[in-house]
Image (spheres, rainbow, N blue to C red):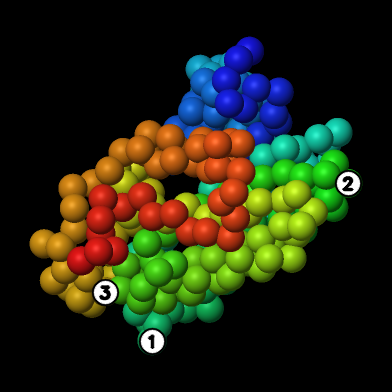
Amino acid sequence: MSGRLAGKVAVITGAASGIGRSMARAMVDDGAHVVAVDVDADRLAAVAAELGCEHAVVDITDDAAVRQLLDRERVDILCNNAGILDALTPLADVTDALWDRVMRINLDGPFYACRAVLPKMVEAGGGVILNTCSAAALSGGRAGAAYTASKHALLGITRSIAWYYGDKGIRCNAIAPGAIQTKMHVREAPHTGGFERYGAYFPTMPPHGRAADVARVAAFLVSDDAVYVNGEIVSVDGGWNAF
C-alpha cells in the first residue's frame, strides 16, 4: 500500500470512537498498519471491521497489559489518544475517586505506553509518539481541575521525551484539540458551578470542529513530512486559544 505511512506500524489508543477512530481511519488511508486499541470491545471490533485494521482490547491503566500490547516486533508510531473529561469540576469539589480516574486514564496510561515503547524505538533507531493533549493544556479555563492538570502533565511528558530522546531519532509531539464534535462531551452532566463559570465564555468559542479535522493534523505529525517537528504542541481549535 502506498502513502506517507506505508510500511509503518501505528498503535492508537482510544480508537473505538471520536478522534481516535478518525486517527485510525486517516492512518490506514495513509498506508499504515494500524493497531486500534480501546476498552470498548464491541465498538472497537466494528471499527476494525470497517477499516480492515488490527485491534486489541486493552485497559491502558493496566501497566502489564500495556507492556504486553507493545511487546511487538516493531512499533513505529504510538498515538496516546485515550482520555476522559472531568465534568468541568472545580478543584474544591474534586473527589479522590474523580482525580484518580482522570489521572489514571489521561496520564498514567500514556506514561505506561511511552515507557514500554521507548526502549524498542531506541533500539530500532527512531520512532514517533503523538500525545493527545487539549486546549486545556495551554490554559486554566478550558476544563475542570483534574482534566486540566492531567493535560498539562501530559504536555510535560511530551517535551521531556522530545528533549531526552530526540538525538536517538525519536520525535514526540502533542496535539491540542479544541471543542470537537464527539460523544466524549455528552457522557455525563457537567458540574453546575463549573458549567456556569465556563458558560460565560461560550461566545468566544469557534464552531465545533470535527474529529477528522484533528486526525488529518495527527497523520501529518506522525509522518516524515513533519520530520523536523519535535517537542511541539499543535492546536487544532479553530483559533479558540487566540481569544
Q: Quadrant of the N terminus?
A: top right
- Residue at which label 3 appears: 194
Under mark 1, the amino acid is: Ala
Toward the left, the furthest residue is 203
Q: Tell me the number on the disc at residue 123.
A: 2
Q: Nearer the viewer, mark 2 or mark 3?
A: 2
Disc 2: CA contacts within 10 A as few (<14), some (14-19) or many (>=20): few
Secondary structure found at label 1: helix
Whole-number angstrom distance, CA of label 3 to CA of label 1 = 11 Å
The mark that comes first in sequence, 2 or 1, is 1
- Residue 92 rendering spot, x and y as whole percentages: 38, 86
Under mark 2, the amino acid is: Glu
- Residue 34 rendering spot, x and y as whole percentages: 63, 28
- Residue 154 rendering spot, x and y as whole percentages: 56, 65
180 or 99, nearer to the observer = 180
Q: Is residue 83 left or right of residue 179?
A: right
The mark that comes first in sequence, 3 or 1, is 1
Secondary structure found at label 2: helix
Compared with 210, 27 (above or below) is: above
42 or 106, nearer to the observer = 106
Q: Nearer the viewer, mark 2 or mark 1?
A: 2
- Residue at which label 1 appears: 92
Disc 1: CA contacts within 10 A as few (<14), some (14-19) or many (>=20): few
Q: Is residue 166 left or right of residue 202?
A: right
Which residue is at 34% across, 68% downward?
143
The mark that comes first in sequence, 2 or 3, is 2
Which residue is at 41% across, 76% downward?
145
- State if disc 1 and disc 2 touch (CB < 8 Å): no
Image quadrant where residue 215 sits: top left
